[in-house]
Image (cartoon, grey):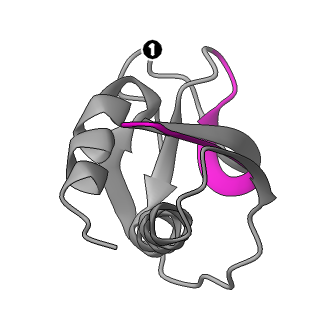
Amino acid sequence: MFCTLCKGEMKKGRVNFPVDVEDNFILIKEVPALVCEQCGEYFLEDDVAGAIEEIVKKAKAADVEFEIRKFTARVNTPKIHPISRRGRRVLRDRFLDISG
């Protein structure tokens, strides 16, 4: 697979994924992703994005203001999530709709 931005090669790797929603900031460490070897852009798989949504939902329900978490969910689906790190605003808007 090739990067949609620079056409570099994408490899499996891990990234730190920040989520800043309303009054909550969550940094999720070691998130599995496809990472471009050339520009560093990354893409999340569908099941990884779903697991992140669950982490954020639980943090909002617990009224967490700031949290650093290690990604520990088991994920297997090879489908690529269409949201890149530059599209994080779209994910944030989806998180705003999650009711705790």
Q: At which x and y percent is residue 89?
A: 29, 30
Q: At which x and y percent is residue 52?
A: 51, 63
- Residue 70 vs residue 68, the one in the foreground: 68
Q: Is residue 29 visible?
A: no
Specify whether 100 is left or right of 34: left
- Residue 36 vs residue 56, the one in the foreground: 56
Magenta segment includes 79? no
Height in image: 97 above or below 73? above
Specify whether 98 is left or right of 50: left
Q: Is residue 19 visible?
A: yes
Magenta segment includes 29? yes
Judging by the rendered image, the residue that carries numbered circle 1 is: 6
Residue sitting at 32 percent across and 41 percent down? 92
Residue sitting at 30 percent across and 54 percent down? 95
Q: At which x and y percent is residue 78?
A: 48, 74
Q: Which residues are magenta?
A: 22-38
Height in image: 31 above or below 99? above
Height in image: 3 above or below 70? above
- Residue at disc 1, secondary structure: loop
Which of the 4 image quarters holds residue 38?
top right
| Residue furthest to the front | 63
Query: Which quarter of the image is occupied by the C terminus?
Result: bottom left
Specify whether 2 is left or right of 14: left
Q: Residues within 10 Å of mark 1 (few under 14, many from 20)?
A: few
Height in image: 28 above or below 41? below
Q: How many discs appear? A: 1
Q: For the residue marked with disc 1, what is the amino acid? A: Cys
- Residue 96 vs residue 75, the one in the foreground: 96
Q: At which x and y percent is residue 36?
A: 61, 30
Which of the 4 image quarters holds residue 70?
bottom right
Residue sitting at 46 percent across and 71 percent down? 61
Magenta stretch secondary structure, dominant: strand
